[in-house]
Amino acid sequence: MYNNIFDTHSHYDDEQFDEDRIELLSSMREKGVSNIVTCGCDIESSRANMALSEQFDFIRFAAGFHPENLEGNEISDLGDIEELASHDKCVAIGEIGLDYHWMSSTKEKQKDFFERQIELAKKLDIPVIVHDREAHGDTLEILKRTQPKGVLHCFSGSVEMAREIIKLGMYIGLNGVVTFKNARKSLEVVKDIPLNRLVLETDCPYLAPVPHRGKRNDSSYIPHIAERIGEVLKMSAQEILDITNNNAKELFELC
């Protein structure tokens, strides 16, 4: 059995876990999962994840406004995020960023919330967890200008973009997508970036890796991601898990 499994990005507040959330999370230790970060998308979900972190010693949480969850919220609401971030188990501001696929808010509003939340993270000296969907250029421009510490989760950019992110001192988060048949771009990134800048994640309940693709995802499936990355790098899955576990501890300052 694998150990040192660190899931750096999950959403255990999601309704897909409503029927068995506590039972599932209670089983994680025996499945080799050592740490989980569960991410907020707005005030309500951030509070729900805070409550989970209080219930399980191996769970930490992130608080923030996801770019798809901005309607009906104002910059003044970041005061609530700052209050949540003062909790001793809050390890990041997130999930924050830009999403030009769904465009549930204007680009201007997304950029404003993104930058303000980066400012908050820098004020509190904690990392950011960044969402970037079909917004690579603007995401990179803002990160270069603001220089936060953190991770670009569910990385979908090019090798060249990954290099730029790493130059900023940030981490690259990869998930079940690397096991998909069309994962060429993700695997090129795996081959190119230094291993000390890679962390693993699920984004559960979404993006379950092969052989569970299409089903509800959870943190115990991360070894499938490590196995695929290990195949590419000619390393064992446990080596990948050990290295990315250490990287995640450094990212979230848990060392």
Image (cartoon, rainbow, N blue to C red):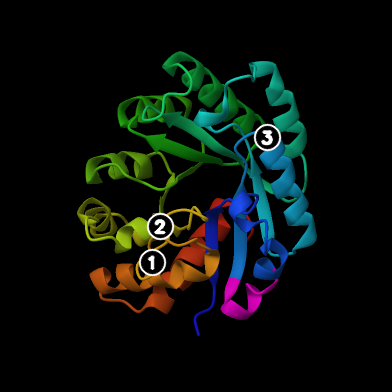
Residues tagged 2 and 1 counted as in contact (Cβ below 8 A): yes
> Could you tell which of marks 2 and 1 lies nearer the N-terminus?
2
* Secondary element at image label 1: helix
Camera-side mark, 3 or 2:
2
Tell whether 233 sits left or right of 117. Answer: left
As drawn, the residue found furthest toward the front would be 19
Label 1: few (<14), some (14–19) or many (≥20) C-alpha neighbours in 10 Å: many
Residue under label 1: 225
- The residue to which callout 3 is attached is 124
Residue that numbered label 2 is attached to: 175
Q: x, y (%) of residue 195?
A: 36, 61
Say which amino acid is labelled 1: Ile
Q: What residue appears at the point 25 percent right and 58 percent down from the top-left corner?
A: 187
Dot 3 falls on a residue whose secondary structure is helix
Q: Residue at x 61, y 54 (%)?
A: 37
Q: Nearer the viewer, residue 68 or 254?
A: 68
Q: Which mark is residue 190?
A: none
Q: Residues within 10 Å of mark 2 (few under 14, many from 20)?
A: many
Q: Is residue 111 left or right of residue 135?
A: right
Between the C-alphas of marks 2 and 1, the distance is 6 Å
- Give neighbour class at mark 3: few <14, some 14-19, many 20+ (Cα, 10 Å): some
Residue 90 covered by magenta stretch: no
Taking the view exactly as shown, the residue that stands out farthest to the bottom is: 1
**11 or 248: nearer the eye?**
11
Viewer-closest of 243 and 31 = 31
- The magenta segment: 26-33
- Label located before the other in sequence (3 or 2): 3
| Residue type, mark 3 in image | Leu
